[in-house]
C-alpha cells in the first residue's frame, strides 16, 4: 500500500506530528510504502531525512488567524495548495492519503479530485476540533467536510468517536488509539543531557513533579500551579516543572505572576518548549496532568512507558487510558484537593510509585504499542480501499474548490486595493512634504 501522510505542523514538540511520525515508521516496518507532505522544514523533515522517507514541502501557514484578513489569506491559499497536492497525487500514484487533522481541507480536496481515498485523523472532540474553523464555519458544515471529502474518520479515543457520531454515521468512524514507540522513547530518555535538577539549581535528591503540554486553556497549568501550592504546604522539598510550547500567550504571561503570588518562586519552574522531554521524564518522580480534556493523552502514556507514576484528572480521552489504582491515579476533574493528595500519596509511598510505574509501562506495551497502532491503521485503510467507488467524492471536491477559488479571487482583489491605497498614501505624503517645503 502506498500512503501519503500529510502533516499539519513541522515540529515534533506537537503531539499530532509526533504520533504521525510514529505511525509512519511502524507502517514502513510492516512493508507499507510511505511518503509525507509537510508545511515547512523543521523537526519533521529532519527526522524524515534521517529515516530516508521521501517528502515534499507545501507551505500551509496557519488555519486561521485573529483577524478576518488572516482567515481570508488562509482560505485563499488553500485553493492553490489543493491544486499542487492534486498534481503530486496523480504523479505519485498513491493508494491513500492520510490527513493527520481535520484542518487540512486542501489535502482532502486534492485527494478526492485525484480519486485517492481520504482518511481523516481526529485528535480532539468534534466541538474542540471545530474551533479553528468556528469564525467562518458551523458544526454542520464541518461535519459535511469530514463526511463528503473523506472516506473514513479515525478517532483517537472512544470519547472523541462519541463526539463525532453526533454528526457522522457510525460506519464512517473508527477508534484507533495512538501508539507509543517505547524503544525509541527509551533511547531518547537515555541520551546524555544536563541534569534537570542541576539546571534548576536544586539538590540532587529533590523530588520533581513534571507537567508536559502546550501552555493553553486545555492543559490548564493554572490548576497545576494551584495543586503545587497545596502539595508544597505539606511536602518540605518537592518542586514542580512545566514543559511545553506557548499556545495562548496571555496564559503564558499569567503563569509567572501566579507562581509569584502563590509564593512558589523556586518551587515551580516553567521551562518552555524542549526537545529533550523523554530525558526530563526520566529524571522526574511523578507525572501530573491537570488537562480539562485530551484526545487521548500522549504525554501521560509516554511517562507511563518510562515507568513513571501518573496522576491525572479524570478528563475526556485520558480517562480511557488510565485505570485508577491499577496503572495510575485518577481524581475527579477540577478537584484540586484530591489531586494534591494523590501526588502526595505517590511521593510518600515508594512501593505505590514503583507499582504504578511498572504497571503503567506494561499497559502501554499491551495496549498502545506502535506495532498495534500500525496494524490497526492498516486494517481500517484496507477496509476503506475495499469499499471506495471510483470518483464518488469528485463533485463535492469541485464544489469546495470552486468556493475557495472565489475566495482567492476576492483576496487578490483586496490585496490589489491595499497596494493602491498604500501607493495613494505614499503619494499624498510626498505631496504634503513638497507643499511644506515650498512654504
Image: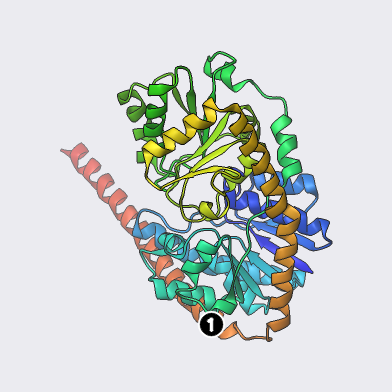
- How many residues crowd mark 1 within 10 Å: few (<14), some (14–19), many (20+)? some
Q: Is residue 243 visible?
A: yes
Which residue occupies the foreground of this view, 277 or 401?
277
Q: Is residue 323 left or right of residue 426?
A: right
Residue 368 in the image, given as x and y percentages of width and height: 68, 53
Which residue lies under the disc numbered 1? 396
Number of numbered tags placed on the structure image: 1
Q: Is residue 275 left or right of residue 248?
A: right
Q: Residue 397 appears in which quarter of the rendering?
A: bottom right
Give the residue at x 41% y 66%. 411
Relative to 49, residue 421 above or below: below
**Where is residue 326 drawn, in percent x and y?**
60, 45
Where 124 sits versus 350, above or below? below
> Which residue is at the far left?
439
The percent position of residue 377, horizontal first and vertical second, equals 70, 65
In the picture, residue 350 is in which quadrant?
Answer: top right
Give the residue furthest to the right: 31
Q: Quadrant of the N terminus?
A: bottom right
* Residue situated in front as seen by the camera: 417 or 332: 332
Tell me if 130 is positioned left or right of 179 in this view.
left
Percent x, y of residue 10: 61, 49
Amino acid at each position: 500500500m502506498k500512503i501519503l501522510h500529510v502533516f499539519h505542523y513541522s515540529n515534533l514538540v506537537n503531539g499530532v506530528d509526533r504520533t504521525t511520525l510514529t505511525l509512519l515508521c511502524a507502517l514502513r516496518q510492516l512493508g507499507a510504502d510511505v511518503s509525507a507532505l509537510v508545511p515547512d522544514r523543521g523537526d519533521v523533515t529532519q527526522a524524515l531525512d534521517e529515516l530516508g522517507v521521501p517528502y515534499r514541502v507545501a507551505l500551509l501557514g496557519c488555519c486561521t488567524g485573529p483577524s478576518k484578513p488572516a482567515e481570508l489569506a488562509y482560505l485563499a491559499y488553500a485553493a492553490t495548495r489543493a491544486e499542487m497536492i492534486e498534481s503530486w497525487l496523480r504523479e505519485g500514484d498513491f493508494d491513500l492519503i492520510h490527513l493527520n487533522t481535520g484542518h487540512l481541507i486542501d489535502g482532502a480536496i486534492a485527494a478526492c479530485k485525484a480519486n485517492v481515498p481520504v482518511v481523516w485523523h481526529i485528535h480532539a472532540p468534534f466541538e474542540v476540533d471545530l474551533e479553528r474553523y468556528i469564525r467562518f464555519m458551523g458544526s454542520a458544515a464541518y461535519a459535511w467536510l469530514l463526511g463528503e471529502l473523506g472516506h473514513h474518520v479515525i478517532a483517537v479515543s472512544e470519547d472523541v468517536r462519541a463526539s463525532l457520531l453526533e454528526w457522522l454515521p457510525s460506519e464512517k468512524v473508527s477508534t484507533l488509539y495512538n501508539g507509543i514507540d517505547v524503544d525509541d522513547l527509551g533511547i531518547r530518555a537515555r541520551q546524555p543531557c544536563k541534569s534537570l535538577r542541576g539546571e534548576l539549581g536544586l539538590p540532587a535528591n529533590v523530588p520533581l513533579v513534571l507537567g508536559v503540554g502546550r501552555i493553553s486553556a486545555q492543559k490548564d497549568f493554572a490548576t497545576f500551579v494551584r495543586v503545587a501550592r497545596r502539595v508544597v504546604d505539606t511536602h518540605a522539598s518537592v518542586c514542580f516543572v512545566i514543559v511545553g510550547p506557548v499556545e495562548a500567550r496571555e496564559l503564558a504571561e499569567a503563569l509567572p505572576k501566579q507562581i509569584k503570588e502563590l509564593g512558589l518562586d523556586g518551587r515551580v519552574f516553567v521551562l518552555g518548549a524542549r526537545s529533550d522531554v523523554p530525558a526530563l521524564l526520566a529524571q522526574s518522580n511523578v507525572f501530573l496532568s491537570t488537562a480539562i480534556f485530551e484526545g487521548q493523552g500522549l504525554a501521560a502514556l509516554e511517562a507511563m512507558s518510562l515507568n513513571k507514576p501518573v496522576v491525572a484528572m479524570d478528563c475526556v480521552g485520558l480517562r480511557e487510558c488510565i485505570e485508577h489504582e491499577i496503572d495510575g491515579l485518577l481524581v475527579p476533574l477540577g478537584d484540586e484537593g484530591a489531586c494534591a493528595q494523590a501526588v502526595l500519596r505517590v511521593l510518600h509511598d515508594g512501593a505505590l510509585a514503583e507499582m504504578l510505574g511498572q504497571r503503567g509501562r506494561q499497559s502501554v506495551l499491551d495496549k498502545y504499542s506502535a506495532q498495534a497502532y500500525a496494524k490497526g491503521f492498516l486494517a481500517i485503510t484496507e477496509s476503506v480501499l475495499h469499499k471506495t467507488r471510483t470518483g464518488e467524492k469528485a463533485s463535492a471536491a469541485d464544489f469546495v474548490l470552486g468556493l475557495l477559488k472565489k475566495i482567492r479571487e476576492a483576496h487578490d482583489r483586496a490585496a490589489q486595493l491595499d497596494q493602491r491605497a498604500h501607493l495613494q498614501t505614499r503619494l499624498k505624503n510626498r505631496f504634503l512634504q513638497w507643499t511644506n517645503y515650498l512654504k
